[in-house]
Image (spheres, rainbow, N blue to C red):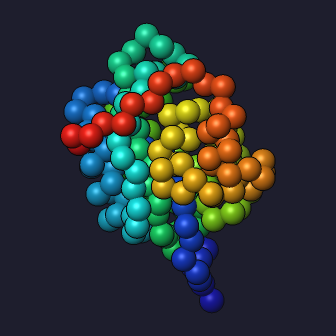
Amino acid sequence: MTDVNYTLNMNQAYLLIGGNMGNRARNLERARVFLCDEAGNIFSQSSIYETAAWGKTDQPSFLNQALALETQLSARVLLKTILGIESRMGRFRQEKNGPRVIDIDIAFYNDDIIAETGLYVPHPEIQNRRFALVPLAELDPQKIHPVLKKSVQQLLTECKDPLPVKRLENL
């Protein structure tokens, strides 16, 4: 008998973390620590990138990073854990695409396709966002999007998002 919060096998999740309020680099670091403490083992992480705000452009630039996480948590419990971390770090969802201390999204969970209330995996807009695809391509350019059947690198090549994504060297 297993607890419904856990799976018998290890799962691989690709997470996207970012934020544009406060000490952005420190907030990414805090999010990584919380994720390791509560969700699993980060076995790979991309460089940190700076990008202009997407969607709502009258706000500070974001720092973004992709993480590869090994977890025993189910996708639903992983999401609940992520939302708890965001809340503890001071994330308040007041304005769509508005400024935020931290944002943690599940880009991929194994090769699963999940469409449930509040949980959509793979992230439904990933193919349209260069700030997500660039760090993911650094981690695993050959990762196949389970719905679109294209690699992350192919999606990046085809992405029409014009916003520049600048790799930061000194973080």
Judge left or right: residue 151 versus residue 36.
Answer: right
Labels in figure, total: 0
Q: For the point 48% across and 69% down, which residue is it? A: 70
Q: Where is residue 96 in the image (x, y as percent from the top left)?
A: 54, 23
Viewer-proximal residue among 60 and 171: 171
Side (left or right) of 95 relative to 155: left
For the point 47% across and 24% down, which residue is it? Answer: 164
Quarter of the image holding residue 92? top left
Residue 34 location in percent, x, y? 32, 57
Most extreme residue toward the top is 58
Residue at 62%, 57% (x, y): give it.
Answer: 142
Looking at the image, which residue sits at the far bottom? 1
What residue is rendered at 51% in x and 16% in y?
Answer: 56
Query: Where residue 87 appears, x then y in whole percent?
Result: 38, 42
Q: Is residue 79 visible?
A: no
Image x and y of residue 83, in percent: 46, 47
Quarter of the picture containing the C terminus is: top left
Name the residue nearer the viewer: 142 or 72.
142
Residue 140 vs residue 59: left or right? Answer: right
Foreground pick, 125 / 153: 153
**96, 124: nearer the viewer:** 124
Residue 128 found in image quarter: top right
Rendered view: 71 above or below 165: below
82 vs 48: above or below: below
Instruction: Decide if residue 159 is in sight here.
Output: yes
Name the image quarter holding the N terminus.
Answer: bottom right
